[in-house]
Every structure is written in structure tokens, then in C-alpha cells.
Image: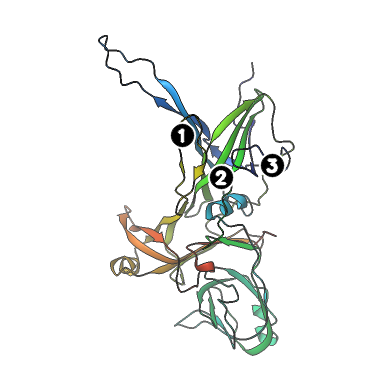
Amino acid sequence: MAIQTQVLTKVIRKKEAAFGTLPGAAGAREFRKVSDSIALKKNKIQSAAIQTNAQRPMARHGGRTVDGNIGVELALGLIDSELASIVRRDWTAVTPLAGLTIVATAADDDEPGYFTRSAGSFIADGLALGMLIKPSGFTAGGAANNDKLLTIIGLTATKLSVAEPVVAAASASGIGITVPGKVTYIPETGHTNDSYTIEKWYTAVAESYRFTGQRVASINIGLAADDKVSAEIAYMGQDRQKATAAYFTNPAAPGGGDMLVTPSGLAIINGKASKVCTNFSVDINGNASVGKVVGSNVTPDVFMDMIDVTGQISVYYENGEMDDYFDQEQSISLINRLDDGIGGAFVIAMPYVKVFGGSESGDKEIIRQYDFTAAPNAAGTGAGKSTILLQDTTLI
């Protein structure tokens, strides 16, 4: 008798062309999972009859739904489809900037290094707080700025501040700026509404569970100090089918590079690289729900609502700055850059965040935890005036 094991269980997914309908069998992709809990659920309809024998009549099965989580160790390109689905916008490239006249200014005690353009607008040209950029076209001493992967931590129409060192250079023409890879964010209009079929193929017992009409309900990304980056994808869906043969044919390998780790990158709080951040998490929640109808035991759809972006940040208590943000209801920005060690990087950027209290812990060093909520920035420094920006420099 074969006993199924997790090692021999494949979890595979593909976008559906129509909600709740199996997509074509080719072109699916396997998950590189840490855990999964996707399962069929049924509502139990209990009788309310009062009987003299003091026993309940038998309950009945009600509506069918599917929900559960898939956990992964985040890597570049690993869950790009799901990240686009939760913000409801496909990944797109940013048009390169060319022919700029720019002065490069090195950092001093008052502010980080920055680039100033003579005309036009960085914001109108599509740049946003938190984006990773690469300058080009500097000559002589300024050539050290070329092709460096820089993190935007401050942005106006004509001034672009970065977290990394800038080599000073006099005004030069013919400067270019590219945004490597692709970006996505919550758009103001034209939202996508993706659904997936997820197949769990139990190879040892030859059973296929096909979960249809699965929408990405939320994604939680967690960054703990000196550890890997985790991501938990929550699904909510319509139904499950069973068969004795795998449905998806020759699914693609999970892909993605090495897992991202928190020591490699930057945590930037209100425009300043932090050396005391011990933990960071962000939850992108689409507030999904299922409907109930008469005459059918499955929901007609999984309904997506407003997108909430919340999280928590923990820091060693070195001064009262974070508490001041809370006490004075000051809006701040939060940016996390994660590098893969071979030139690629992933960014989570929120230009408009408010801190909503927290707690304190630590037997030796004191650590303070702060909850936060993000919102769209009317000033426009977030891409598309969005609550959150994601960038993966390896997407093509």
C-alpha cells in the first residue's frame, strides 16, 4: 500500500480564462512551496427542530467553498503572478529616461546624495519613491555613478535622492535613467480580477484535486532579522474536482532564484536607511468573500473588495523618533529592498504610512513594535498615486 508524502505531492497553478473553468492543460507552473493548506470546505446546515427524544435530526451539507494558504520562501520571480493578482495590476516596464541634463550631488551631513535635472519632471516621467534605478551617460569622475543600482528615497519633479553613495558631477547632458525589470502597484482604474486553478497531484496514490475559481485573497510578506523572507499566499475559491490522473501536463518548474534573505538589502524608514530594524511584515489584503445562492451549492464568484495594506515594524529602541511619528500622527515612507546577491533585487515601497501604536519587548535590549497602515499618496510620489509599489529587477 502506498502512503502519500509531502515530498511526492505537487502543487501546480495556472490562471483561468473564465472564472471557475479549468484552463488548458499546458502552460501551468509548479509551486516551490514550504506549506499548503488548500482544502474543500462545506457549510453544515443544522436542524433547529425541538424533539421529545432530545436528539437533533441529521445535519445536511450546504455550500461548497475552498480556502487555504500556500507558504513559500520568497525569491525573485517565484510568485510574480500572485503578487500582480493581489494588487490587481499586471507587471509592466517603466519607459527609460534619456537625454537628461543632470547635476549629481554627493551626500553630506544634512541629506543623502541626489540628482537634479534642469527641466522636466521625474514624477511625470514615471519614477516613484522606492524604485530601483540605474543611471548612465556620466563621464570623467561622474562615471562611477553609471550602472549602479540605486534606491529612490526622496522624489520631487526635479530632484531624485537615493540611499546609496553618489559621486558628485557637474551638470552633464545626455544622461539616462533606467528602471530595471518591471513594477506593479494598485492602480486607480483598470483593475484586473485574476482567478486560478490549483491542482494538488498526489503522485503516490494517483489522485488529482483540482481547485477551481481560486482568487488571491491576500499575501503576507515577513522579514525577520538574519533570516529568509517568507510569503504566505491566501486563496479563496469556488469548488474542487477529483480525478485519478494529473490534469496539468508538463508543468513548468517553480523557477525563481535563491531565496531572499534579510541581511542583504536595505530597510528605509522615512528616507533614512535603518540599522536598528529587527522585523518587518506587510499584509496586502483584498478582503475577498464568497456569495451564497438558492439552487446551487457553489458560489457564483469570489468577490474582491477594497485593498488594505497594513503591517508591523520592529526596531531597537535607540531614540524616540518612531514614537514621535505615532504621537504626532506624522506620515512617513517605508521601503524594503532585498538583494539576491548576484545583481537582482526586489522592492516593497509604501510612500504614505501612518504608525498606529504598538508594544515593547526584550529582556535585554528593548525592542519596540509598531503597527502601521498605508494609503495612496495624493502628492504622486508613489507610482500611479498608489498605496504600495513592488519591483522585481529580473522580470523581462
Can you say whether 335 is above or below 223 in the image?
below
Q: Mark 2 highlights which residue?
A: 72
Query: Looking at the figure, which quarter contains the N terminus?
Result: top right
Query: Which is more N-terminal, label 1 or label 2?
Result: 2
Query: Which is more N-terminal, label 3 or label 2?
Result: 3
Which residue appears at 27% of the width and 9% of the height? Answer: 53
Task: Point out residue 107 in the picture as x, y percentages from the top left corner.
Answer: 52, 81
Q: Mark 1 highlights which residue?
A: 293
- Disc 2 is placed on an element classified as strand
Residue placed furthest toward the left? 52
Q: Residues within 10 Å of mark 1 (few under 14, many from 20)?
A: few
| Mark 2 or 1: the one toward you | 1
Residue placed furthest toward the bottom? 170
Query: Which is more N-terminal, label 1 or label 3?
Result: 3
Kind of residue indicated by mark 3? Ala
Which residue occupies the foreground of this view, 54 or 263? 54
Q: Give the image quarter of residue 138.
A: bottom right
Task: Point out residue 275 in the picture as x, y percentages from the top left corner.
Answer: 45, 66
In the rendering, which numbered label is found on residue 28? 3
Which residue occupies the foreground of this view, 382 or 169? 382
In the rendering, which numbered label is found on residue 207? none
- Disc 3 is placed on an element classified as loop
Visible residue check, residue 96: yes
